[in-house]
Amino acid sequence: MKFIDLASLIFSNLGRRKGRVALTAVGVIIGTASVVVLVSLAMGLQRNATSQLYGIGELTQIQVYPLYQETMKADGSPNFTPISDQTLAELAAIDGVEFVVPRDYLMGGTIMQYNKLEGYSNQIGIGVDDLSSLGYTAAQGVTALERGTVVIGTQVAKNFYDPRPRPGAEPIEPPDLFGQTIKMTLIKYDSDGNEIRKTVQLRVAGVLTETSGESDWSMYMRLDEMTNWNEWFMNKRINRNKDGYNQVIVKAADVDKTVDIVDQITEMGFSAYTPQSYIEGINSFYVILQIGFGGIGAISLFVAAIGIANTMAMAILERTREIGLMKAVGATNRQIMTIFLGEASGIGLIGGIGGVILGWSAGKIVNVLGQVYLASQIAQETMGSSPTISVYTPPWLLLFTLVFSTLIGLISGIYPALNAATMPPITALKYE
């Protein structure tokens, strides 16, 4: 029997019992729609949760710090393994590392001044000539770092204030610092407690594009300049082989290798952090949630499977004489079994198509209602981010549930189909 003839016969048989098939398929529709909606909800929650973490740092960047021990050295100094120049070479040699960049911070007090305003920021010396190598772009000016210049984040200007405001005066507007010169005063104290100051002039050569991360509140400058200022604070030259670097950025070539590189750096005796570790942990949680939600929806499908088995069992009883006639004219047990398995699978397929359409539509409705609700909350309460999608249905999920529902129908029809295939022809023909 050709496949086209078999398919035509199967759907013709299903059409003879439209009411019973429709009622049985309703159970499959509900089960399939439940799987689609629940798994889509879990996937939507996962996408929302992970998307909010992309602002905490570049996922391919790893922050490396010296790992300080609880015990101190004999001279009372901290016990740690410094991140030396040799360490930088070892980190760069790790498979999957694109480049390594040292960073440093000021080791003393500072006062930033612009005209009559004073301010503060996160001041970072970084060992690159251009911040574009770290993925930063300039909203104004350039990202290149030259001596006597700095590149700042978009929020740095908001940290400037009037140190002597008039009573009742309105808060000042953040100044436009691009192209302006900021006076930075370095402050330290000698052994007698006397204050010593040093003033440097820094021109703002660029303002970075907003990233919702560290860079927005930071002021970047050349590492060698930062090193000179720290040596002034400490009254000694900094030996990188002994003192090391305060922090190093390790850039992975591929985000999938980031966590593995972190593990290797940790084994070298350093502290390493990457936002990708948090995202992988969140993804693992939501995968379990998806399996749980999918299992809840699958319960409805298994209940529907009992209905399919019952429908097929009743169909065999009603068509016993028909089975006997088919065998009498030469139909084999395999052909009889194929017909009834095809009918059971057809019920699963029809229910699966209806369930996929219903589940996908329900997800769209939930998204629309959710966006309307969130938009109204933002409008009434405060300015916030735009509404996000709470239900996400990937195409593969629709295909999977359709195949799964068809497979459930096939499995449900195995026992009734075996009964039909093994029924003796004479007994079937005598059945009233």
Image (tube, grey):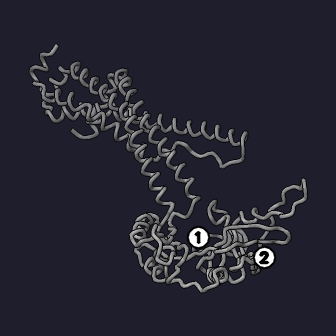
The residue tagged with tag 1: helix, strand or loop? loop
When the figure is inspected, residue 294 is found, relative to residue 76, above or below; the finding is: above
- Identify the residue at horizontal 76%, vertical 67% (top origin): 119
> Looking at this view, is 338 or 220 the one in front?
220
Q: Nearer the viewer, residue 245 or 428?
A: 245
Residue at 72% across / 41% down in the picture?
Answer: 381
Q: Residue at x 18, y 25 (%)?
A: 323
| Disc marking residue 183 | 2
Give the residue drawn at x 55%, y 55%. Answer: 53
- Place residue 118 in its image quadrant: bottom right
Give the image location of residue 247, x and y in percent. Answer: 54, 73
Q: Are marks 2 and 1 in contact (CB under 8 Å)?
A: no
Q: Position of residue 339 (x, y in %)?
A: 23, 32
The amino acid pointed to by label 1 is: Gly
Q: Name the residue under label 1.
A: 135
Q: In which quarter of the image is the C terminus?
A: top left
Residue 61 vs 405, above or below: the answer is: below
Rounded to the nearest angstrom, the CA distance separating label 2 from label 1 is 28 Å
Residue 253 seen in this snapshot? no
